[in-house]
Image (cartoon, rainbow, N blue to C red):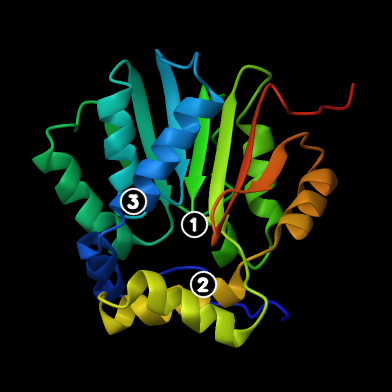
Amino acid sequence: MERILEPELMVNPEQGQAYACADFSVPNEQFLHLFARKFPDFSGPGRVVDLGCGPADILIRFAHRYPQCQFIGIDGAEAMLAPGREAVKQEKLGDCIDLHCECLPMARDERVYQAIISNSLLHHLHQPQVLWQTVKKCSDQNTSIMIMDLFRPESIESARHVVQTYAADESPVLQQDFYNSLLAAFRVDEVRKQLCCAGLDLECEQVSDRHLLVWGKGAVVRKQ
């Protein structure tokens, strides 16, 4: 099945609210667990950026796990960030989490981060290199990099089955977005080619029946 593009940004407030209310605790906790397993020595202090942070649930979980870090969340849709701002306020994490409405590549950001994380952004991008070039620009050999995303099923029927398996109790808005995202997602071999093209020596592997993971530490290959 060929990739079918979906809109890059979720600008509808109904979408933002649907994602904020949905139960993503299992994949989001899996993300945190995978990061801790891949980078057992990471503890901070330092700056962590979440690219495509959405309602900021993963950032909030990271802030509780790594309280010595400063966290920046980037998302191109204010509709997705609005519930995240409220969640950060409720968790009293405003001193360590900043959320910014901005599309990639980040303008005028030349900072190097101690960790770069991203969950479910890649499949939205019509030009995936914008993510990998941002990762390259904002990292050095000490940066912990972890990107998790959906991968594209083999068929329309398989995509529908995944939606029914994992989102049958969610809102129709979220179910449709999930289905569209599955059709727009990449496969492991495609992502490996993207990394090679970007000059990034990162690992890419399947980690669940619907997720792939890109990760590495000190893995940026720079021309001398």
Amino acid type assigned to the residue bearing label 2 in the image? Ser
Q: Is residue 4 above or below residue 121?
A: below
The residue lying toward the viewer, choosing from 141 and 75, is 141
Relative height, residue 15 to residue 80 (above, below) = below
Residue 13: image quadrant is: bottom left
Residue that appears at 39% across and 12% down: 45
**Which residue was labeled with disc 2?**
181
Where is residue 19, by image quadrant? Answer: bottom left
Q: Nearer the viewer, residue 214 or 68?
A: 214
Tell whether label 3 touches label 1 (CB within 8 Å).
Answer: no
Q: Earlier in the sequence, mark 3 or mark 2?
A: 3
Tell me the CA gap for discs 1 and 3.
14 Å
Q: Is residue 40 left or right of residue 184?
A: left
In the rendered image, the quadrant that contains the N terminus is bottom right
Please identify, in this view, whether the residue under mark 3 or under mark 2 is nearer the observer: 3
Q: Position of residue 224 (x, y in %)?
A: 90, 21
Residue 11 place in picture, x, y as percent: 36, 71
Please give the name of the residue rendered at 54% of the width and 54% of the height, measured from the top-left corner: 208
Residue 41 shown left or right of residue 11 in the figure: right
Q: Secondary structure at mark 2?
A: helix
Q: What residue is shown with label 3?
A: 26
Circle on res. 120:
1
Cα–Cα gap, marks 3 and 2: 18 Å
Crowd tier of the residue under label 3, counting other residues whose Cα lies within 10 Å: few below 14, some 14–19, many 20 or above: few
| Front-lying residue, 111 or 91 | 91
Q: Choose the circle earlier in sequence order: 1 or 3.
A: 3
Instruction: Report if residue 221 is visible in the image.
Output: yes
At label 3, the amino acid type is Val
Which label belongs to residue 27? none
How far apart, in angstroms, are the residues tagged by discs 2 and 1?
9 Å
